[in-house]
């Protein structure tokens, strides 16, 4: 149990420290609201699309392709997203915060926290195909999570809604992250290999996402007291770290998944909120208070919750 706690802390603590650095920089006057605004733009329009492209174009989408397993993961993510969206729209008084609440509640840190956990769980597994299967699952869920989030923000964008269905669809297609996904898939299917200088440039741009985004998160952090928005933050964290993984494991178990498959499903759903989810909120008119707060709380608590779930579900015989 201790090894999982140590790994989780080593993965999530740098995010927290970078956010604290952002708070310090803001208070010292080194960064200001303009820096945060344009920093988020750099991440959203360039760094994240390039990161997604880099993740997808190199993936071997034919390796260990388990259609029922992948369909369940995609179906569950879409189902959980839709249920959370509907319930939030029905019961939240502040309709302007619905998109940020939902985006924070279901988006997992698939590309940063997920792979190291999978490596720890399965690097010495008896079946050599388990780890590649987990990484493939990460790649596909990454595409789905950004696609669904693009729909969410497009539907809640007043300017897009004024133009009807066509406006919403155009808003989705023009989303730079969607463009990054489509470009990555196109290069992957064509079998094209990036030249060394292009690959190095892409990797370099990808590397700025975590430090710049978390510094901007820290610069945006504020505590407004125990108002209704703080209640949304708490509920979103509970949904992300508890309701999502517990319900996913129960449903997957009922569908007949066991062992390593169930372990992968649990990890994918128990991860903290994604950094990219906050950046989308900041750039697409979402509530940055909710996004930044949920990101910090989920990152801080996930080391404990991930370790707890791995220990409990293993003790119950659900996981490998």
Image: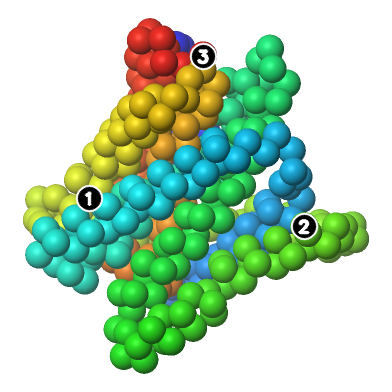
* Image point (53%, 26%), residue name: 261
* Among the 4 quarters of the image, the one containing residue 1: top left
Asked which secondary structure carries label 2, the reply is: helix
Q: Locate residue 153, reporting x and y percent.
A: 37, 70
Colour scheme of the rendered structure: rainbow
* Residue beneath disc 2: 188
Please tell me how crowded label 1 is: few (under 14), some (14-19), or many (20+) other residues with Cα within 10 Å: many
Indicate which disc residue 320 carries: 3
* Residue beneath disc 1: 233
Q: Is residue 187 left or right of 220 when viewed as pictured?
A: right
Q: What's the CA distance linking mark 1 and mark 2?
A: 38 Å
* Among the 4 quarters of the image, the one containing residue 184: bottom right
**Residue closer to the observer: 34 or 183:** 183
**Foreground label between 1 and 2:** 2
Asked which secondary structure carries label 1, the reply is: helix
**Residue closer to the observer: 152 or 100:** 152
């Amino acid at each position: 149990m201790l090894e999982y706690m140590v790994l989780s802390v080593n993965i999530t603590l740098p995010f927290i420290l970078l956010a604290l650095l952002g708070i310090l920089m803001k208070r010292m006057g080194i960064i200001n609201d303009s820096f945060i605004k344009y920093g988020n733009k750099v991440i959203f329009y360039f760094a994240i699309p390039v990161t997604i492209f880099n993740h997808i174009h190199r993936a071997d989408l034919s390796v260990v392709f388990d259609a029922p397993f992948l369909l369940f993961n995609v179906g569950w993510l879409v189902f959980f997203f839709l249920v959370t969206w509907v319930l939030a729209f029905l019961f939240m008084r502040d309709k302007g915060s619905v998109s940020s609440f939902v985006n924070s509640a279901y988006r997992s840190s698939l590309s940063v926290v997920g792979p190291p956990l999978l490596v720890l769980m399965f690097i010495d597994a008896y079946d050599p195909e388990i780890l590649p299967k987990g990484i493939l699952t990460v790649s596909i869920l990454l595409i789905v999570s950004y696609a669904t989030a693009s729909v969410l923000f497009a539907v809640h964008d007043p300017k897009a809604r004024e133009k009807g269905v066509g406006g919403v669809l155009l808003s989705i297609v023009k989303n730079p992250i969607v463009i990054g996904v489509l470009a990555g898939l196109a290069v992957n299917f064509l079998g094209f290999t990036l030249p060394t200088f292009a690959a190095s440039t892409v990797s370099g741009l990808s590397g700025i996402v975590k430090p710049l985004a978390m510094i901007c998160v820290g610069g945006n952090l504020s505590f407004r007291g125990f108002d209704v928005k703080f209640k949304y933050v708490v509920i979103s964290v509970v949904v992300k770290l508890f309701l999502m993984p517990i319900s996913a494991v129960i449903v997957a178990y009922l569908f007949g998944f066991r062992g390593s498959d169930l372990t992968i499903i649990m990890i994918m759903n128990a991860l903290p909120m994604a950094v990219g989810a906050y950046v989308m909120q900041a750039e697409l008119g979402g509530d940055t208070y909710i996004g930044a707060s949920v990101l910090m709380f989920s990152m801080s608590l996930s080391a404990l919750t991930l370790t707890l779930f791995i220990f409990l579900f293993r003790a119950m015989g659900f996981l490998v």
